[in-house]
Image (tube, rainbow, N blue to C red):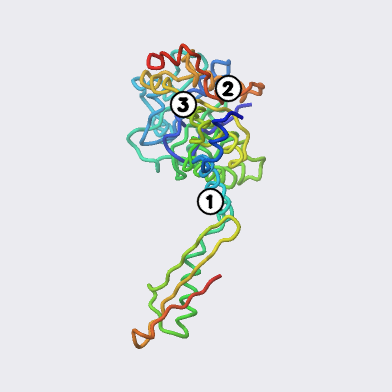
């Protein structure tokens, strides 16, 4: 039984593509056949984050318009088995995405893959709506910041009223919160919304907290999903979130600031 | 509680607490009107229609203000009624 997971947020720049790449990679590493689909037509970026930008030949729009078949457009990841990428088109615009076309592709992907991770574009327009429309589960990526929380709330409204599950009267899309760019030290100083505050406001289960981490940028620089960076706190937090997603009971880490020893205090600049 | 914390607690609320409170208020209102369409423009239009049956009013001289509060929200509609002389001109306020 395959599952369609949308990674969405409303607001741009909060970490949807980083999360899609990390999450899909994590699911594949756990042995599940996984495909990650870029829905950001016209502003393709998942290929860069996944490090396969030079291997893109066909894209989702080519498949929708019958110019290529799905097999030709899928890119197999070179590092992780069971992982494929379906890139977005860089030249067309979002109007080329049709509900029928997306449905046909997802149904075909369901035959091969256990998990279909849909990387949503920002906003609530066509691309974002189609990315979430067929979803079974939603990962709502939110930063601890007012505009991001508000936009996440808006997207939760769209999921509840305009998804296919809602329209068909089936059980609702299962929504889970992923709080990213969390800075525990700033939270402790009262400069940043606490995880409890965000969770209380959005009122959905917490899938994970991804700490603010320099390794996210360095991973994207190199086209490596951050979950593959073993020494990165963000990578570890994503691995935990994947475990939770698969039903394991894993405690949340990186919620309180790292206790600095005398040594690291003395050599703060060097760390 | 350390001595430092004692002095800290005297400080004004943190910006994170302000953010939380603002979000709670704005989202409570947005969730209510999420599925209903925005009625304010229609309300303004219909009020002007009613008033213009009795007095000549400038369609552009209506100001609609909404202040969303925690417990009470106020809707303030101000329509300027043109009078023969400038001295007599005054505004009518309708508070809902």
Disc 2 to disc 3, C-alpha distance: 13 Å
Which residue position is annotated with label 3?
A212
Pointer 1 local density, CA inside 10 Å: few below 14, some 14–19, many at least 20: some
Disc 3 to disc 1, C-alpha distance: 27 Å
- Where is residue A124 shown, x and y percent of the image? 47, 44
Vertical side of A170 occupied by B29: above or below: below
Vertical side of A160 occupied by A271: above or below: above
- Where is residue A253 shown, x and y percent of the image? 58, 22
Quadrant in which the C terminus of chain A is drawn: top left
* A210 on left or right of A206: left
Depth check: give the residue in front, B15 or A203.
Answer: B15
SS type, badge 1? helix
SS type, badge 3? loop
Using the image, name the chain to which the residue with label 3 belongs. A
Residue B26 is tagged as 1
Do badges 3 and 1 share one subunit?
no
- Where is residue B73 shown, x and y percent of the image? 56, 61
Pointer 2 local density, CA inside 10 Å: few below 14, some 14–19, many at least 20: some
Kindly tell me whether residue A107 is visible in this rendering. Answer: no
Residue displayed at 46% across by 26% down: A212
Using the image, name the chain to which the residue with label 1 belongs. B
Kindly tell me whether residue A59 is visible in this rendering. Answer: yes
| Residue B59: quadrant of the picture | bottom left
* A1 on left or right of B49: right
Residue displayed at 58% across by 21% down: A240
Disc 1 to disc 2, C-alpha distance: 31 Å
Residue at the extreme front: B3
Using the image, name the chain to which the residue with label 2 belongs. A
Which residue position is annotated with label 2?
A253
Depth check: give the residue in front, A133 or A230.
Answer: A230
């Amino acid at each position: 039984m395959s599952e369609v997971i949308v990674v969405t947020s409303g607001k741009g720049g909060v970490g949807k593509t980083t999360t899609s790449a990390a999450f899909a990679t994590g699911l594949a590493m756990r042995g599940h056949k996984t495909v990650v689909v870029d829905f950001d037509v016209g502003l393709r970026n998942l290929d860069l984050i996944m490090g396969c930008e030079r291997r893109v030949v066909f894209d989702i729009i080519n498949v929708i318009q019958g110019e290529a078949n799905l097999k030709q457009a899928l890119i197999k990841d070179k590092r992780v088995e069971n992982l494929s990428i379906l890139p977005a088109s860089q030249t067309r615009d979002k109007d080329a995405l049709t509900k029928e076309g997306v449905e046909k592709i997802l149904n075909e992907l369901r035959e091969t893959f256990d998990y279909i991770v849909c990387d949503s574009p920002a906003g609530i327009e066509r691309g974002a709506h189609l990315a979430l429309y067929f979803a079974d589960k939603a990962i709502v990526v939110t930063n601890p910041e007012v505009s991001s929380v508000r936009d996440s709330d808006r997207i939760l409204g769209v999921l509840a009223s305009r998804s296919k599950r809602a329209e068909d009267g089936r059980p609702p899309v299962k929504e889970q919160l992923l709080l990213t760019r969390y800075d525990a030290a700033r939270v402790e100083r009262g400069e940043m919304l606490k995880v409890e505050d965000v969770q209380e406001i959005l009122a959905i289960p917490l899938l994970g907290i991804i700490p603010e981490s320099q390794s996210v940028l360095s991973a994207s620089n190199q086209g490596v999903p951050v979950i593959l960076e073993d020494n990165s706190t963000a990578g570890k937090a994503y691995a935990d979130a994947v475990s939770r997603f698969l039903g394991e009971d894993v405690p949340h880490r990186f919620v309180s600031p790292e206790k600095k020893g005398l040594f690291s205090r003395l050599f703060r600049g060097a760390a | 509680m350390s001595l430092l914390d004692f002095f800290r607690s005297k400080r004004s609320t943190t910006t994170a607490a302000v953010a939380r409170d603002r979000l709670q208020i704005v989202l409570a209102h947005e969730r209510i009107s999420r599925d209903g369409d925005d009625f304010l423009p229609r309300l303004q239009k219909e009020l002007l229609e009613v008033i213009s049956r009795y007095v000549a009013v400038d369609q552009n001289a209506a100001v609609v203000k909404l202040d969303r509060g925690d417990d009470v929200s106020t809707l303030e509609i101000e329509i300027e009624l043109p009078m023969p002389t400038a001295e007599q001109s005054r505004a009518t306020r309708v508070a809902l």
